[in-house]
């Protein structure tokens, strides 16, 4: 939708084909009785990327409002240790000093280093297409490459964090940021330590009506910009004329077009919509990011000890990631993330109740098969919540729905339910994402979480910006 808004405002006639009956893909919502849930993403950073779309669509629309969070996450450890991560770096550093015995100066230095990483790679990797020889010789690119030793490209995130902090709980807290793009902190490059910068220095936010408001807003601005939507229209084929994309086949009908732009998962696109001859095998065979298992629970009791974002850490983080990425099985003591938008959005749950989005990391469902471990995982999740929060949660659940990796794939076509396309476990992963255009088929372009620059809402919005620029340059 971000690409559609940008192209429509440049004068293109844009038609969006969506297989579901609703817009938003992973960023959709679920209603259960009197409860509302954001179905997928729960953390909102870089709101200026959404603001930009409002400005581009030239609509004087003040309906998109959001709050900057003063507290980001509450962390709970099995031994009773509790950390409140304030969005104020100084306050957060003091909390880690007081509760975990860390040197607060080191914590602040870590956040500064995080800013350095981000500012170095931003122009280099995140805001432009990596393809095209000319771009490799841009000044910013060269500068970035020269700084590479300071980027710790040859160390894992865990290695750098373990060397920097003395308390394993601090290491675990900062290692967690690898999961923001579905990676394994014990293998992912230390460069991913740029992620805390987004939360602590630039800010974490929540739209006034929850995350789904981003989808609603984009959908509205797109329609206002003249974009036409075709829901319940799965694309069955991209039609080629020699080596040029010239339209789509959907619901048995042909829709001719000058260009085709897709944000669907690249594995599904090559497998289902294009002849095999065009498949970039090496890119498609890369390791996939993790998936997730989500329980949506309507809870008939308020929990004042919980905030908007809460983490109940596993005791053995390394083993958890070994299971997820090596064994490809869920872990018996999973790290649990609980997101409760009703803490801010009162309409999301009835009075004195809360809407719990309970998520655990799950392995990529390699063989796209029905999930058999739901009951066991649910039992482990409930036991852990009861243990850590000293409650009996089962009796408080009055509404329930479940989304597993198989369901994620069925609903959005992401291979094996992977949340962020290819994993970022290798130091070359930035180069192992599909480009924003096809090298073999003219007029075919790509955006979204499985192509450059990567998964997650901010990067998907950046991919829309990159691909629009590419179309302007290449299709003059
Ligand atoms: C549980 C969960 C939690 C997440 N948490 C966060 C978070 O906190 N923060 C964050 O930034 N990101 C998060 N993400 C990741 C984020 O949601 C994605 O990176 C992003 O939404 C991907 O957008 P996309 O447009 O690339 O793909 P999608 O949202 O998957 O959209 C692809 C669309 O294409 C449609 N489609 C597929 N095949 C066809 C076809 N043949 N014809 C027509 N339509 C088709 C699908 O129905 C879908 O609507 C999370 C994801 C999940 C699932």
Image (cartoon, rainbow, N blue to C red):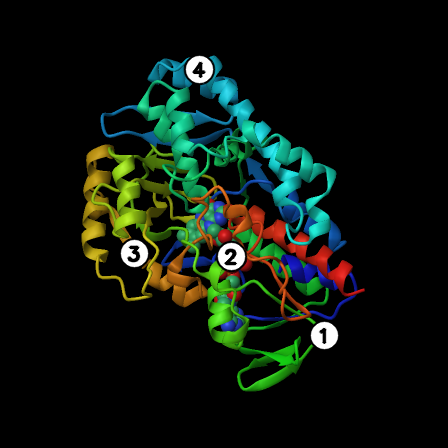
Q: Closer to the camera: disc 1 or disc 3?
A: 1
Visible in this render: residue 232?
A: no
Q: Earlier in the sequence, mark 1 or mark 4?
A: 4
Q: Earlier in the sequence, mark 2 or mark 3?
A: 3
Q: Closer to the camera: disc 3 or disc 4?
A: 4
Visible in this render: residue 275?
A: yes
Q: Secondary structure at mark 1?
A: loop
* Residue behind mark 1: 258
Q: Residue at x 54, y 78 (%)?
A: 237
Structural crowding at the residue carrying mark 2, measured as other residues with C-alpha within 10 Å and reported as few (<14), some (14–19) or many (≥20): many
Query: What x and y, as percent, mark residue 354?
Result: 36, 44
Q: Is residue 405 left or right of residue 197?
A: left
Q: Closer to the camera: disc 2 or disc 4?
A: 2
Q: Secondary structure at mark 3?
A: strand
CA distance for labels 3 and 4: 39 Å
Residue 450 circle label:
2
* Residue behind mark 3: 400
* Residue behind mark 4: 94
Q: On the image, which quarter does residue 68 sit in?
A: top right
* 167, above or below 300, in the image: above
Query: What x and y, as percent, mark residue 400?
Result: 29, 56
- The yes-or-no answer for disc 2 within 8 Å of ligand 1 is yes
Tag 2 near tag 1, CB within 8 Å = no
Q: Secondary structure at mark 4?
A: helix
Tag 2 near tag 3, CB within 8 Å = no
Q: Earlier in the sequence, mark 3 or mark 4?
A: 4
Q: Nearer the viewer, residue 413 or 54?
A: 413
Q: Is residue 258 left or right of residue 98?
A: right
Q: Residue at x 30, y 55 (%)?
A: 399
């Amino acid at each position: 939708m971000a690409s559609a808004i940008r192209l429509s405002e440049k004068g293109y006639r844009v038609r969006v084909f969506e297989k579901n009956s609703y817009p938003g893909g992973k960023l959709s919502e679920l209603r259960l009785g009197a409860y509302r849930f954001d179905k997928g993403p729960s953390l909102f950073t870089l709101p200026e990327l959404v603001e930009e779309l409002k400005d581009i669509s030239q609509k004087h629309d003040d309906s998109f409002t959001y709050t900057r969070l003063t507290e980001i996450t509450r962390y709970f450890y099995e031994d009773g240790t509790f950390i409140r991560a304030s969005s104020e770096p100084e306050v957060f550093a003091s909390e880690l000093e007081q509760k975990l015995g860390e040197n607060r100066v080191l914590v602040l230095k870590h956040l500064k280093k995080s800013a350095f990483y981000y500012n170095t790679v931003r122009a280099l990797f995140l805001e432009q297409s990596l393809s095209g020889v000319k771009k490799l010789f841009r000044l910013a690119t060269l500068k970035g490459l020269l700084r590479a030793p300071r980027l710790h490209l040859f160390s894992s995130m865990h290695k750098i964090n373990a060397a920097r902090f003395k308390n394993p709980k601090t290491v675990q807290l900062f290692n967690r940021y690898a999961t923001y793009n579905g990676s394994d902190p014990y293998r992912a490059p230390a460069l991913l330590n740029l992620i805390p910068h987004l939360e602590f220095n630039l800010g974490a936010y929540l739209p006034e009506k929850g995350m789904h408001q981003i989808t609603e807003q984009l959908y509205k601005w797109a329609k206002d910009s003249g974009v036409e939507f075709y829901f319940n229209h799965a694309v069955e084929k991209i039609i080629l004329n020699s080596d040029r994309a010239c339209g789509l086949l959907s619901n048995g009908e042909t829709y001719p077009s000058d260009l085709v732009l897709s944000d669907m998962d690249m594995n599904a696109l090559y497998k289902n919509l294009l002849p095999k001859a065009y498949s970039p095998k090496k890119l498609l065979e890369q390791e996939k990011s993790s998936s997730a298992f989500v329980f949506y629970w309507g809870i008939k009791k308020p929990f004042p000890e919980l905030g908007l974002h809460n983490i109940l850490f596993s005791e053995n983080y390394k083993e958890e990631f070994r299971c997820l990425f090596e064994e490809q099985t869920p872990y018996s003591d999973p790290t649990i993330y609980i997101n409760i938008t009703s803490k801010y959005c009162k309409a999301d749950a009835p009075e004195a109740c809360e809407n719990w989005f309970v998520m655990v990391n799950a392995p990529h469902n390699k063989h796209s098969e029905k999930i058999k471990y739901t009951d066991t995982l649910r039992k482990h999740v409930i036991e852990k919540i009861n243990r850590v929060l000293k409650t009996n949660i089962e009796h408080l659940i009055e509404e329930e729905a479940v989304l597993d990796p198989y369901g994620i794939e069925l609903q959005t076509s992401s291979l094996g339910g992977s949340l962020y396309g290819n994993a970022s476990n290798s130091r070359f992963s930035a180069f192992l994402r599909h480009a924003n255009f096809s090298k073999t088929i003219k007029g075919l372009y790509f955006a979204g979480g499985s192509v450059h620059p990567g998964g997650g809402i901010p990067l998907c919005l950046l991919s829309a910006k990159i691909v629009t620029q590419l179309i302007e340059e290449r299709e003059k």
